[in-house]
Each structure stands twice: as structure tokens, then as C-alpha cells.
Image (cartoon, rainbow, N blue to C red):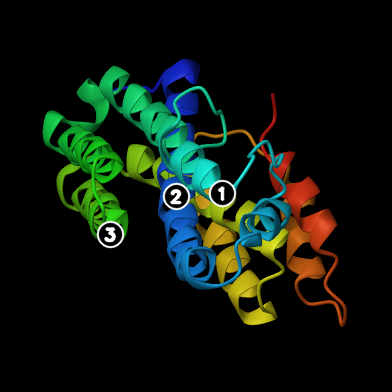
Amino acid sequence: MGIISVENADRLYWLGRYSERVYTTIRLFAKSFDDMIDSYLDSYAEFCKNLDIPNIYTSRDNFIERYCFDETDPNSIYSNLKRAYDNGVVLREEIGSETVSYIQLAVYELQRARESQAPLVELQRVIDNILAFWGIVDDSIDSENVRNIIKVGKRVERLDLYGRLHMSREEMQREVNRLAGRIPRTCLRYREDNLKVLSQIVSDPVIDYCSIVQKVDDLLEE
């Protein structure tokens, strides 16, 4: 594998971020779905607040339809999955057609979920295909740099989401440690001081979750 262009390094990074965003938000959505259906009709507002996305939805049913499947909603699962797929298609030479195919299968399953009376079944298949995508990244991509850039994107996105969700200290420390061990093995230009601050924040007696999100989002140099 030759030198990776700046543009493709950015695409690989965002491929990792968008695939992780889809994976984690589907899991969160699935946990909230039963509450929305059975009892707590307005819990979608809390869901939006936790993820720090605008609550543009008018009802529970409107939220379920739009958040999952609306391509015009930039925060929807569909929009994020489509961004992952679009990056994957452009990167076919770097990551291989088989790797891209698992993202494409995830798109198909999400489209099937839109027509389903039990969408959680198809949404679980979306998750399964994302997991298969990550597995084939390790198995089929020869370039360590390519693999690591995708995984850095994945870890950055997970830290961003976990910071917004106020996850436990153990979860935050695990993700910071994984990111710190991975990012120096890439060609990405990043702010080492931000990485050191992140390590300190997750060790502080009281975790400053807002600072975690800020430092993570400002980790890469322009």
C-alpha cells in the first residue's frame, strides 16, 4: 500500500466515525424503543437531549420514522450510515470491495427496517453488518496505517458519544487508552496536548464530560 493522500486519510477517519455512530446510536435507540412504545411516549425528547441533537420531532411516531430513516435529517441513523457508505465507496481501492460490501448490506437492512412492523430485528442486522465490517477491516486490509486510521475514527466517535452520555469512568478510561495507543501509529496529525489532557480528565475525581467532548472534537489538526 502506497502513501495515503490527506483526502483519503480524512475519509478513512470519517468512515470509522460514522460506522461507530451508527452502531452506538442504534444500540441506544433499541434500549429506548420499548419505553416509547409501551409507556413513556415523550422519551424521545430525553434521547435527543442525551445525544445533544436538536429535537425537531413532533411525536413519538415521527421520531421513530425520521430519526431512523429520514435521509433529510442530518442526525438520522440513515444519514450517518449513508455517509459511511459514501466514504467506503470512494475508498474501495484502499479497503477492498468485500469490506465495502458489509456497509452496503447494512444500508439494505436499514431500508428493510423502514418497511417492517418489527424494525428492531432489521436494526440488529445493521449492527451485525457493522460488526462484520470491523472484523473484515482487521482480516482483509493489509495496510496497518489504513486499519489504524479507521480505528482512530471509531475511538474518537465513541469517546465523543460516551462523553455526551456521561458513561462510567472505566468506560472512558478504556477508550482514551485505546485511542492513545492507536493514534501515534497513523499518519494523522493530532494535538498531543489534547490527548494528554483527555488522559488527565478521565483520571480526575470528578470527570468534566464537556471538556472531553471539546478535546476529542479538536484532537486532529486541520
- Indicate left or right for 163 with 92 as reference: right
| First reached walking from the N terminus: tag 1 or tag 3 | 3
* Whether residue 180 is situated above or below residue 91 in the rendered picture: below
Disc 3 residue type (three-letter) = Gln
Label 3 vs label 2: CA separation?
14 Å
Using a 10 Å C-alpha cutoff, classify the residue at mark 1 as few (fewer than 14 neighbours), some (14 to 19) or many (20 or more). many
Estimate the x, y position of residue 52 in percent, counting from the top left. Answer: 72, 48
Q: Which residue is mark 3?
A: 124
Q: Residue at x 30, y 28 (%)?
A: 88
Q: Amino acid at mark 2?
A: Glu
Label 2 to label 1: alpha-carbon separation: 6 Å
Q: Total label count?
A: 3
The answer to whether residue 70 is left or right of residue 213 is left
Q: Is disc 2 surrounded by few (<14), some (14 to 19) or many (20+) residues within 10 Å?
A: many
Q: Which residue is mark 2?
A: 20
- Asked if 108 appears above or below 214 in the picture, the reply is above
In the picture, the quarter occupied by the C terminus is top right
Above or below, 141 against 204 in this view is above
The residue tagged 1 is 157
Q: Secondary structure at mark 2?
A: helix
From where the camera sits, is residue 33 visible? yes
Tell me: 171 left or right of 19.
Answer: right
Q: Does the residue at mark 2 contact the one at mark 1 (Cβ under 8 Å)?
A: yes
Which quadrant would the N terminus be assigned to in this image?
A: top left
Tell me residue 215's x, y (percent): 77, 48
| Rendered residue at 79%/47% (across/down) | 214
Given residues 163 and 215, the one toward you in this image is: 163
